[in-house]
Image (tube, rainbow, N blue to C red):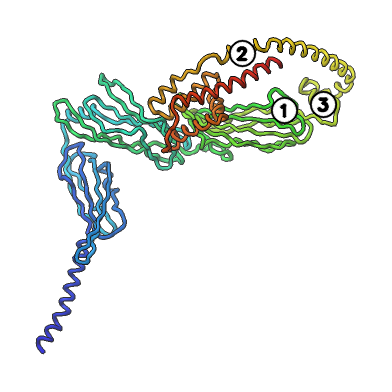
Amino acid sequence: MVNQALRIRIRPISVILSLLLIVSATYSHAQATATLSADVVSEFESVTLTVTDRSRNESDPDFSSLESDFEITQVSTSSSIQIEGGRVDSTRKWQLELMPKRTGAINIPPLVVGNSRTNSLRLRVNPISDRERDYISRTAFFETIVTPEEQYPQAAIYVTRRMLYTSQARIPSMPQEKKLDIVNATVLPIGNRETLREVRNGIEYYVMQWRYVIFAEKSGSMRIPGENARVAIYGNQFRPQIRPIVAPEKTITILPIPDSYPTDEPWFPASRVELAQSFEPSGTYTLNLGDALTRSIELRARDSYQSALLPLELGSIEDVRVYPEQATLDSILDNGRVWGTQSRSFNLVPIEPGRVTLPEFQLTWWDTDARDVKVATLPSATFIVPDPRSNGVSSDVAQILDPSLETQPNLLQTGIDEVSSWIYFLVVVAIVGWLTVFTLLYLNRERLLQRFRAKSFITQVDYGAIRHALSHSDRSTLRHAILHTVAQHLDVDLVSSRRLFLDSDNGHQLLTQLDQLAYNESTIEFDYDMKTIQQVIDSIVKNYASNSEAFGLQSVLN
């Protein structure tokens, strides 16, 4: 009986002890811990912080408390699961490479990992000598050039990230294309990595640089992130050392939309805006009912890009049906500046006779250089649609020929018979003269054509810039060189050059590939070599020459 009672007393105690051991073991395993690869480092040396968590918590640690004293240059994670004696032990690890921002004693506070907190740590950073620090800073360094340092939303900001180093430095392999991720902004790379040389303070440097154009999406502060690289430093009686070089981040100001900008107009910033228009058929002031007049408008905006351009729209026009065509958008580089371009055509069909006035076209924009509101304007145009039921000369036509008649509407009517006789006489003279000129030109057409060819298209295309860009695998520069080569050879502007490529099937395919490689970070292979590019350009030039010869002869005949 005694033994049984003793067993009864012991059993609850053993159960309680077992539960306490399990809870204690679980709590000990739930603790997150932090360790350093070294407690003492020298200035410019990095240290590895390892955070270990065994609590099966899915959340990541909060490392924001480290940013005031360290640059976090790299973060890696790993996880493992062990099953022992039926118990599952899950472990997650984070390894951070930290670059101290200052010397002296640095306290690393406890880090929050889910419901746990790590232990605190202490790191000692010993300064190097002034002589060694100066030598390292002169041997290899980063610099970031930002222009301008204040800008408006959707206007271009040019960023150049440069690495400069001397022959005493050994740098790691650097990529041809380097991404620059910026929150709330569109970033477009300008070409690939550029390599050049530069002399500063009597020291020759090798330079690698990457260029970008950035378009902020909203006002406020915009952070351009920094970067770092490990460089081997030699010479100056110091032993070779692996030292990190750091490009500090930069913060620039994105200005708000000015109060002086009209609230009823869409926001459109640029440093320069160019508008142009043309009509087809050109040189006419009369339209027949049902015939189409094409009004083409072209917009070029410096320090803007295609996605930020305002759509070209024509409002309703009295007695005219408007049929807009699809707009053509592009972003091009010209003398190191980005231009957004847009062209659009509108087919205008009159539906009633009389005077038709196409209103002037206006585009409100913000001049980022002058910091002022500007309005770009295209002039209005007036055309006459004759009444097919009338056999006489329209008074509207007469007013265009002689505006003074507008105040004398009866003058043309009183002298209509006299005017008609003169018109018949002039028509006969014109027909005789036309036949004479046509006969002479027909007999000499071969001589005219040969002289036209010799004058305009006998020279060969200069492919030097294209070969240079292709040899350096610079797709953005190659695209610019191709458009410039055709524009210079045919004496046209870049927009017209681009239109010639888009009108050609092979040219359209070539530009599409280059656009994807230059602006869309595409991973497609560029399957054009010098021979195929030359064939595309030769075909475009030949087609342009044929069309120009026909147009030149027709102009002479007319």
Q: Position of residue 97 (x, y in %)?
A: 24, 43
Q: Position of residue 226 (x, y in %)?
A: 32, 37
Mark 1 and mark 2 in contact (Cβ < 8 Å)?
no
- Tell me what residue is drawn at x 78 percent, y 35 percent: 352
Q: Position of residue 522 (x, y in %)?
A: 43, 38
- Tell me what residue is drawn at x 75 percent, y 26 percent: 286
**For the residues carrying marks 2 and 1, which lies nearer the camera in this image?**
2
Residue type, mark 3 in image: Ser
- Could you tell me how far apart the alpha carbons at marks 1 and 3 are, in whole angstroms? 15 Å
- Could you tell me how far apart the alpha carbons at marks 2 and 1 are, in whole angstroms? 35 Å
Closer to us: 167 or 516? 516
Closer to us: 232 or 417? 232
Residue beneath label 1, please?
382
Q: Where is 59 relative to 385, above or below?
A: below
Mark 3 and mark 1 in contact (Cβ < 8 Å)?
no
Residue type, mark 2 in image: Phe
Point out the tag, 2 or 1, that comes first from the N-terminus: 1
Point out the tag, 1 or 3, that comes first from the N-terminus: 1
Q: Which mark is residue 394?
A: 3
Mark 3 and mark 2 in contact (Cβ < 8 Å)?
no
Point out the tag, 2 or 3, that comes first from the N-terminus: 3
Q: Within 10 Å of the Cα at label 3, are there few (<14), some (14-19), or many (20+) other Cα atoms? A: some
Secondary element at tag 1: strand
Secondary element at tag 3: loop
Closer to us: 557 or 339? 557
- Quarter of the image with the N terminus is bottom left
